[in-house]
Image: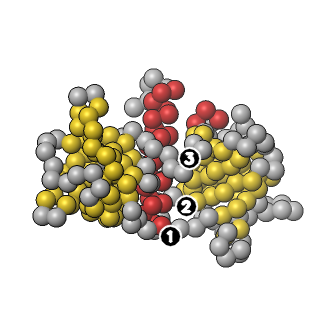
Amino acid sequence: MEIKIGTQLQLEPTYTEKMERFNCKVLEQEEHILYIDYPVNMATKKTAFLIDGSEFRATFRTETNQSFAFNTEVIGRKAGTIPMIMLHCPKPEEFIKIQRREYVRVETPVDVAVQFQNYKYQLVTADISAGGLALTLKGEVAFNEGDEVDLTIVLPFANSDVKYIMTAATVVRIFEKDHKRIVTIQLTDTDDVDQQHIVRFCFERQLVNHRKETDPFYS
């Protein structure tokens, strides 16, 4: 599977507080390089001049309406009749297929502080998505299904950046699985910026998990 000439890409900056999206088109392609026209900011409709080294999450749709994503960065520009920006293009096996549901859920450990009334618990996720998470319980807890709690979620990104997401949430279910007690929690008051951080974190972890599955020497 390859990205064909004329494919529309949507770019979202990685590791930034500012939420932006850009549309662009693939004009040329060489090995591991995509040449795109200058992107247009989807909100302002103005042309964007991307800086070399800028990192993005790129998404595109195939002719069969399958959606894929990959991490990329600006590696240069090419002059000509149509000025073009050069993006790094990973190998096709590194593309991540986007699930046809609202949020991708990833199995990965993340530290979460749960505040309920005067009780505070330090727990670790079994999985996480931008819509909710599952936590492994280490003992008895005071909250029950339907209770409102406050969460502080710690997201450690690969570039050593750490984001702290503070949000209200609702306890959905408490159950036992594989001899462990699990609580599932729905996020109810996450702002757009924090939600985008979780989406990017999940995508990054999904990419790492995918590499581990396909490359036995990846660590």
Q: What residue occupies the far right of the structure in this picture?
A: 81
Q: Earlier in the sequence, mark 3 or mark 2?
A: 2
Residue identified by numbered label 1: 18
Residue 78 seen anywhere in this rendered image of the structure: no
Q: In this view, does 195 lie to the left or right of 73?
A: left
Above or below for 77 versus 68: below
Q: Which kind of residue does numbered mark 1 sit on?
A: Lys
The residue mark sitting in front, 3 or 2, is 3
Q: In which quarter of the image is the C terminus?
A: top left
Residue 191, given in percent of the width and then of the height, sits at 43, 68
- Residue placed most toward the observer, 83 or 61: 61
Looking at the image, do the residues carrying marks 1 and 2 touch, with CB atoms under 8 Å apart? yes
Mark 1, residues whose alpha carbon is within 10 Å: few (<14), some, or many (≥20)?
A: few
Residue identified by numbered label 2: 13
The residue mark sitting in front, 3 or 1, is 3
Q: Is residue 36 left or right of residue 137?
A: right
Mark 3, residues whose alpha carbon is within 10 Å: few (<14), some, or many (≥20)?
A: few
Looking at the image, do the residues carrying marks 3 and 1 touch, with CB atoms under 8 Å apart? no
Residue 99, given in percent of the width and then of the height, sits at 57, 42
Q: In which quarter of the image is residue 147?
A: bottom left
Q: In this view, does 190 lie to the left or right of 121?
A: right
Q: In which quarter of the image is residue 36?
A: bottom right
- Residue at 36% over, 48% down: 133
Residue 5, given in percent of the width and then of the height, sits at 81, 46
- Residue placed most toward the observer, 166 or 212: 166
Residue 96, given in percent of the width and then of the height, sits at 58, 40
